Image (cartoon, rainbow, N blue to C red):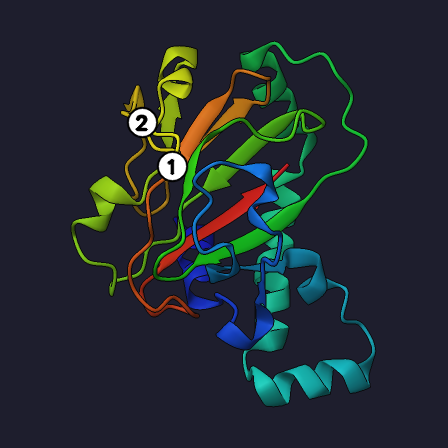
Amino acid sequence: PDLYNDLVDYFPPSRYFNKDRRANAGQVGRQDADKRHKCSVFDILNVKSPAAVAARVKQWPKFKEAQLVWARAVAVLFSNQVRDELFKKFKVTKRALTRDFRIQNDHNGFGIGVHPDNHKKIMTFQFYLPTRKNPTETVYTYGTCLHTKEQHNTRNKQTGYSVCERKMAYLPNTAYAFPVTRGSYHSVEKAKGSGGGGRGGRHTPRCC
């Protein structure tokens, strides 16, 4: 809980996010793709020189403290213990060559229909950072939906959506993980709210 609370408190301001400009990424139902904004955690951590840090502090007064908080998150999520537990649980035998850790901020209108992740990935691990400004109904709408192959095959061919086999609740200090296969189908409903650092929207740090 302490780390989670710190991540909420030191969530990057909106200027640190860049629009996801992939043109629908070949996914049916990827709606308003430019309304998903992303920030690499390593873009925060790799600022080293005193001059560069001072420049960031002018834009984000809590920048130096934020570096320490997100470094703690990396140390935990990229630890051998977490990796070994996840790989054991899901019977993963592949060796990870690279790792990614990004913060996603979905603005009003963004959604993705039923799809599998890139088959080059080994595992997806995502956790939620809802804010106090998220309406109660987002608990039941913002969470990721997991789907069967049949639900993928019968999805709406325009929106890409289908009924959920299992729905994740968008709750504080929660996360989910799954090994990526050609059949690891999932989707996310449209986000509502302005997004930005702590102003509604759907905040989902994603790693591995």
Specify the farthest residue to the front. Answer: 158
What element does badge 1 sit on? loop
Q: Residues within 10 Å of mark 2 (few under 14, many from 20)?
A: many
**Viewer-proximal residue among 159 and 186:** 159
Question: Can residue 175 be seen by looking at this rendering?
Answer: no
Question: Can residue 161 be seen by looking at this rendering?
Answer: yes
What's the CA distance linking mark 2 and mark 1?
11 Å
Residue at 38%, 37% in the rendered image: 158
Q: Position of residue 103 (x, y in %)?
A: 54, 55
- For mark 2, what is the residue? 162
Residue at 41%, 34% in the rendered image: 187
**Viewer-proximal residue among 116 and 73:** 116
Residue at 16%, 52% in the rendered image: 136
Q: Quadrant of the C terminus?
A: top right
Residue at 35%, 57% in the rendered image: 109
Determine whether 34 is above or below 65 in the image. Answer: above
- For mark 1, what is the residue? 158
On screen, residue 29 versus residue 98, left or right, reads left
Q: Position of residue 93 (x, y in %)?
A: 71, 12
Of circles 2 and 1, which is in front? 1
Q: Residues within 10 Å of mark 1 (few under 14, many from 20)?
A: few
User: Which amino acid type corresponds to the residue marked 2 in the rendered image?
Assistant: Ser
On screen, residue 53 versus residue 34, left or right, reads right
User: Which amino acid type corresponds to the residue marked 1 in the rendered image?
Assistant: Gln
Cβ atoms at labels 2 and 1 below 8 Å apart = no
What element does badge 2 sit on? loop
On screen, residue 116 versus residue 56, left or right, reads left
Q: Where is residue 63, by image quadrant? A: bottom right
Determine whether 208 is above or below 109 in the image. Answer: above
Q: Position of residue 137 (x, y in %)?
A: 17, 49
Q: Position of residue 121 (x, y in %)?
A: 68, 29
